[in-house]
């Protein structure tokens, strides 16, 4: 498969060079092809894209569209007979695939750089995070302390929010919490508790005593490390566990 993709890219490069073009001509231009290579360029690229799409290779389809700038800013394509709705399906499928693999930075970069305003608008959706108390489940509300610091508090059960589940101190830097039980704290404390060490094995149970298994060692190869974990030591949280943990800035 790798050899066939390499041949495909070489063919596209050769056609672009033979046609004397640095980019695809804009759709609807009245100027006719200057040579035979320009005449066969667009139909050949269309056939290649449809062939890769039929094989389920949306990654190559999106890569070709991005490299050749197939999508115009006016929500049309530069290739006759290739509908914009079909390209959007390729992009949405590939973005979903990237997010399933925890490649959120790559997904956001693709959305930002896409010429299609419909795809580009995805970065403006669901940008608000709603927080709730892990004890009573009620929404958290901002509260200003005497020193002027704003903290999220639960006004229903009056439970302090943003306290580390291990050292019981306020989290003012990176906050990590489990999606299963809602408990969390300092990233360093989570690594210390779940990562284990030379003298003790990694732990799986939440340190609060709720009984939830926050760290799944059996899923170590399920997901790649995310960008936020690449700087951590190798003995840190397993890659599988990282898929169940969420990271954000401190609450205070």
Image: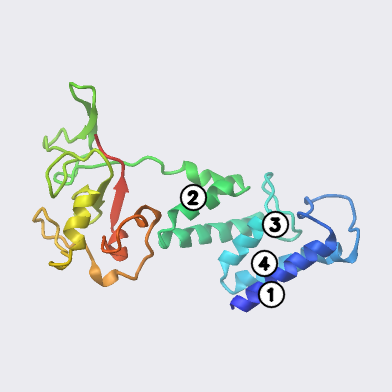
> How far is the residue under mark 1 from the one under mark 4?
14 Å
In the structure shown, which secondary structural element does the residue marked by tag 1 occupy?
helix
Residue designated by label 4: 49
Q: Earlier in the sequence, mark 1 or mark 4?
A: 1
Task: Answer left or right for 134 relative to 225.
Answer: left
Residue designated by label 1: 7
Q: Earlier in the sequence, mark 1 or mark 2?
A: 1
Q: Can residue 206 be seen in this view?
A: yes
Whole-percent x and y of residue 158?
11, 34
Q: Can residue 182 be seen in this view?
A: no
Q: Which of marks 4 and 3 is nearer the N terminus?
A: 4
- Look at the picture and state if 220 lies above or below 76: below
> Image point 22% across, 47% down: which residue?
186
Residue designated by label 3: 68
Residue designated by label 2: 108
Whole-percent x and y of residue 88?
59, 56
**Comparing labels 4 and 3, the label whose residue is closer to the camera:** 3
Contact? badges 4 and 2 (CB < 8 Å): no
> How far is the residue under mark 3 from the one under mark 1?
17 Å
Whole-percent x and y of residue 61?
62, 64
């Amino acid at each position: 498969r790798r050899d066939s993709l390499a041949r495909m890219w070489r063919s596209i490069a050769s056609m672009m060079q033979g046609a004397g073009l640095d980019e695809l001509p804009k759709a609807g231009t009245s100027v006719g092809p200057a040579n035979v290579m320009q005449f066969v360029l667009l139909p050949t690229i269309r056939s290649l894209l449809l062939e890769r799409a039929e094989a389920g290779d949306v990654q190559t389809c999106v890569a070709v569209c991005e490299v050749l700038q197939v999508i115009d800013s006016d929500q049309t394509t530069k290739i006759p007979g290739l509908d914009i709705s079909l390209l959007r399906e390729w992009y949405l499928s590939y973005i979903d695939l990237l997010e399933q693999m925890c490649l959120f930075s790559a997904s956001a970069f693709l959305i930002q750089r896409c010429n299609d305003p419909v795809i580009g608008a995805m970065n403006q959706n669901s940008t608000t995070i709603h927080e709730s108390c892990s004890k009573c489940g009620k929404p958290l509300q901002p509260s200003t302390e005497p020193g002027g610091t704003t903290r999220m508090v639960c006004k229903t059960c009056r439970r302090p929010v943003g306290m580390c589940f291990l050292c019981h101190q306020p989290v003012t830097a990176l906050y990590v919490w489990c999606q299963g039980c809602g408990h969390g704290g300092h990233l360093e404390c989570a690594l210390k508790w779940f990562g284990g060490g030379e003298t003790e094995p990694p732990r799986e149970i939440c340190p609060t005593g709720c009984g939830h298994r926050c760290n799944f060692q059996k899923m170590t190869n399920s997901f790649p490390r995310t960008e936020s974990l690449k700087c951590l030591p190798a003995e840190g949280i397993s890659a599988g566990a990282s898929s169940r943990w969420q990271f954000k800035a401190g609450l205070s």
